[in-house]
Amino acid sequence: MEALHRRRLLGAAGAVATVGLFGPDVWAQAKDRLVIGMSLEPPVLDPTKNAAAAIRELTCPSVYESLGRIDRTGAVGPGLAASWTVSTDGKEYTFKLRSGVKFHDGEALDASVVKFSLDRLFAPGSTVPAKSLYTDIGKVEAVDSTTVKITLKSPNSYLLYNLSLGDAGIMHPKSAATNDKHPVGTGPFVFQGRKEGDSVSFAKFSGYRDAAAIKLNSVIFKVVKDPSAQVNALLAGDVDTFPGFQAPELVARLRKDARFAVVVGTTEGEVILATNNGKKPFNDLKVRQAMAHAINRKDLIEAESGFGTPIGSHFPPHNKAYIDLTGTYPFDIAKGKALLAEAGYPNGFDASLKLPPVGYAQRAGEVLASQLGKIGIKVAITQLQWPQWLSEVFKEHNYDLTVVAHTEANDLDRYARDGYYWNYNSPAFKAKWREVVEATDFARRDELLKECQRIIARDAVNGFLYQLAKIGVWKKELVGMWENSPTPSVDLTGVHWKA
Amino acid sequence: MIEFLSRRLVAALVTLVLATVVVFAVVEVLPGDPALVMLGTDARPDTLAALRAQYGFDQPLSVRYFHWIGGLLRFDLGASHAYGTPVAKLIGDRLAVTLPLAGLALGWALLVAVPLGVFAAWRHGRASDWGVRGFTQIGISIPNFWFGIVLVLIFAVTWQIFPAGGFPGWAQDAPRSLLSLVLPAVALSLSEIAILTRVTRSALLDTLREDYVRTARAKGASEGRVLFGHALRNALIPVTTVAGLIAGFLVAGAVIIESVFRLPGVGQLVYDSINNRDLAVIKNVVILFTILVLAVNLLVDLAYALLDPRPRVTA
């Protein structure tokens, strides 16, 4: 309340006449309304139609819920399925659905609805962006109205996790076609409307199965792209929180303000210097090792205003299967130069570094160009728009080096993919990854994951730089926001204003 | 007069047809695959191909061009690939922000610049003239997004008289919507004020050197009558030309100011659709801008004809 009073006073000092009619939106402080700022705008509002992370942040699990639910630690618990059993060979999953679950339009959830939703994910003509996560599924059967059985073609230890992602959100056959513009799900918030380029609003779903846990009556997601406009929106009280604040250089300004809490947590985003392993001279292990020795992660993290955790492989430090491999090729310019000479490049060589238009890549790109320059690699930076990056770098592999964050969870599988953009081809890794996917014992899987991390660290496939931090900013009175970001979602269950 | 106008109209139509070809070609050669943008890095080749077929990205260029032109002629702009909403609705919603913003900025610029320019011309060579010229120099040099941020810090964050950004919507809250356009309009108009002041000043000075002005003075007309009755009307012709050019710029060029003030305007729409490779939106917005600029130019020509009878005869 203190902030409210102060604002009124300042408004009055500025211009008495405007306070009553046009003063700042005092209702932003109401106890059941939350205004969430977002850096990126979701295109459509259906995660099965577009890959944008912002769609998942807005709608999963607020609108669409999945069979399992990923909690704030990244663990999978019951979602729309109350329980499940897995056969010993890991190929049969039987889900028992919660009963009495309703969609926002009043339709009921039953096994046939779940079958409809899951079938869409891997059907032959399906255009679901995350289809590749679900192609191990052989068939989905509705055993009875509350039991769903999934049979896999081959075991997949990530199936439960993947079925808990927003990509596998359960949609009703009646509303699925129009969910892109008018999302309808079983989640705690009902879509109210959107203004393209501006905001999307939701209201509490009174028919939610656990309505008492939902303390907010109204939630508005506002798109604010420009970092300084984000700070202004917070300072002026137009926005209550930025769960994922994207401008580390401006955090100091917000930390000074007693109204806000700045909470730094973890993400699944590994920032890497992706390297075209299929192209000369990067196909030479010695060259990649030389580059690894030239990289000083401390300077890179400093360029991020200190946010980020060093990584030595493609794996998040907060995961329990993580091992610290940052010492595999320690920062050592002399060693880097020597390795480069051994590889036949005593005078270095020219390389292109194609950067996507995101802050961390811009900052890391400049630092890396200077670091690689010290061992004789003359880096020329090219700036690309996202669509260009996707076509030129990702699809056509027309690049030497690029900086990008891989934000998906469990994304080590990229190193086992044929024709992936960094053109890494290691039969040893592929075999190991197959074991990871088919593991039925999670303790065993963790051991295998460690071996996977070691293989790619040793092969210096990419420059492994640091794990992106999640910088959350919110008003101090706001309780229950997630500190970490295990998946791209903004889970508002339990979020409320301090009374 | 009719011949003059019809000649201008035909020229505008030819320009428009040429513009559709150029716009289509430029949009098509933009690097980047819209299907890949929509489906992201995990998309499988078969999914991408299915999506391309669904949106007709796999059709030959000529088919797609005539499909687009056919739609334009029927006032059917198609649907945005990214949002899934009709392009006409998207553009309409954005124009409801951008046109009032441009109007306010231009109106404010003219309101300040013309009197200021007249004042400077009247006080030609004296300290106040130098003052005005110094101000215009500063006005041109200051980037408008920076000025916008400063305005927000002063009038929205510290004093909280105006909103820091955002746009509630005319239907939801008209007074607040108007209020939220004030700071952006002021930020946007600073350099335009500077330009228009300079143009007014130098045009008026030129006119004041004309023989007929000397004649008027010789006949004993008062300074006010010379300035406002004889010189200003002719001096306004170049001012009108420049104001017309500025109007086109204000509609199309407010991208950064829209971003600073979080206004969902046309500039942001273009920026976003280029980033999303939302081809349907880019093509139609650019053509709409072309039509707007052509219309403004026609209006400027018309204004000439009213201010000065000569083009009616010689053009």
Image (cartoon, helix red, strand yellow):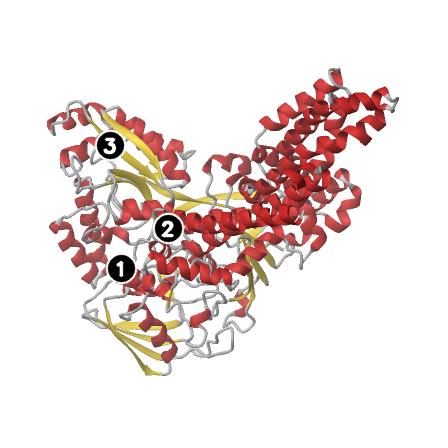
- In the drawing, what numbered circle is on residue A88? none
Could you tell me which chain the residue with mark 3 belongs to? A
The picture places residue A330, in percent across and down from the top left corner, at 23, 31
Check whether the beta carbons of the residues at disc 1 and disc 3 lie within 8 A of each other: no
- Foreground residue, A13 or A352? A352
Could you tell me which chain the residue with mark 2 belongs to? B
The image shows a total of numbered marks equal to 3
Residue B164 as seen in the image, left or right of residue B209: left
- CA neighbours of label 2 inside 10 A, class few (<14), some (14 to 19), many (20+): some
Q: Residue at x 29, y 35 (%)?
A: A353
Residue A323 as seen in the image, left or right of residue B102: left
- Foreground residue, A94 or A287? A287
- CA neighbours of label 1 inside 10 A, class few (<14), some (14 to 19), many (20+): some
Check whether the beta carbons of the residues at disc 2 and disc 1 lie within 8 A of each other: no
Residue B247 as seen in the image, left or right of residue A342: right
Q: Amino acid at mark 3?
A: Ala
Q: Residue at x 30, y 48 (%)?
A: A391
Q: Residue at x 63, y 45 (%)?
A: B4
Work out whether A247 lies above or below A140.
above
